[in-house]
Image (cartoon, helix red, strand yellow):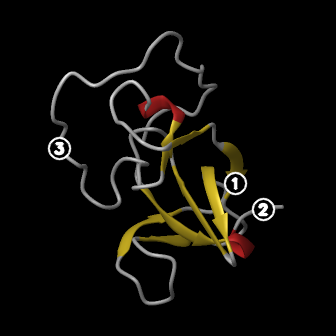
């Protein structure tokens, strides 16, 4: 996991210089519709998000590949782990442990308020 920190908005024109391989699910924080702001200079996406810092609650949680119970696990996050929230939908939060991942979904109720 990478060190959690502040992320700066890229300056100047962003462009791609050629094909980029799509990262494996659960690795980098990028989806078809949005990506972590730290990836803006490397991946083209419709929207970039500056993460909201959250923490895993009192119990360890399983980071999932999809926003549904029973989805494949990416990894387990210990209680108190810093989690960068990127998107909220229904009961789920999509986020990461930094711009290099791991990335996945947790229930919002599993994060501290």
Secondary structure state at the residue bearing disc 1: strand
Of all residues, the one furthest to the right in this rendering is 113
Image location (x, y in percent) of residue 100: 38, 40
Residue under the point 23% across and 49% down = 22
Of all residues, the one furthest to the bottom in this rendering is 70
Image location (x, y in percent) of residue 96: 51, 51
Cα distance between the residues tagged 1 and 3: 31 Å
Cα distance between the residues tagged 2 and 3: 35 Å
Could one spot residue 84 in this view of the protein?
yes
Secondary structure state at the residue bearing disc 2: loop
Q: Is residue 86 left or right of residue 16?
A: right
Q: In which quarter of the image is residue 106?
A: bottom right
Seen in the picture, residue 75 relative to 50 is either above or below; the reply is below
Q: Which of marks 1 and 3 is nearer the N terminus?
A: 3
Of all residues, the one furthest to the top in this rendering is 12
Q: Residue 21 carries which label?
A: 3
Seen in the picture, residue 75 relative to 101 is either above or below; the reply is below
Residue under the point 62% across and 57% down = 87
Could one spot residue 60 in this view of the protein?
no
Q: Quadrant of residue 93?
A: bottom right
Cα distance between the residues tagged 1 and 2: 6 Å
Q: For the residues labelled 1 and 3, say whether their Cβ atoms are less than 8 Å apart.
A: no
Q: Earlier in the sequence, mark 2 or mark 3?
A: 3
Q: In which quarter of the image is residue 48?
A: top right
Q: Name the residue under label 1.
A: 55
Q: Residue 112 carries which label?
A: 2
Secondary structure state at the residue bearing disc 3: loop
Image location (x, y in percent) of residue 9: 59, 21
């Amino acid at each position: 996991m990478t060190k959690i920190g502040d992320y700066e908005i890229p300056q100047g024109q962003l462009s791609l210089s050629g094909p980029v391989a799509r990262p494996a699910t659960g690795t980098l924080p990028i989806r078809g519709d949005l990506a972590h702001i730290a990836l803006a200079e490397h991946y083209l996406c419709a929207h970039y998000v500056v993460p909201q810092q959250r923490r895993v609650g009192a119990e360890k949680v399983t980071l999932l590949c999809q926003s549904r119970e029973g989805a494949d696990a990416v990894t387990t996050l210990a209680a108190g782990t810093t989690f960068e929230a990127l998107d909220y939908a229904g009961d789920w939060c999509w986020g990461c442990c930094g711009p290099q991942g791991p990335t996945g979904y947790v229930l919002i109720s599993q994060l501290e308020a």
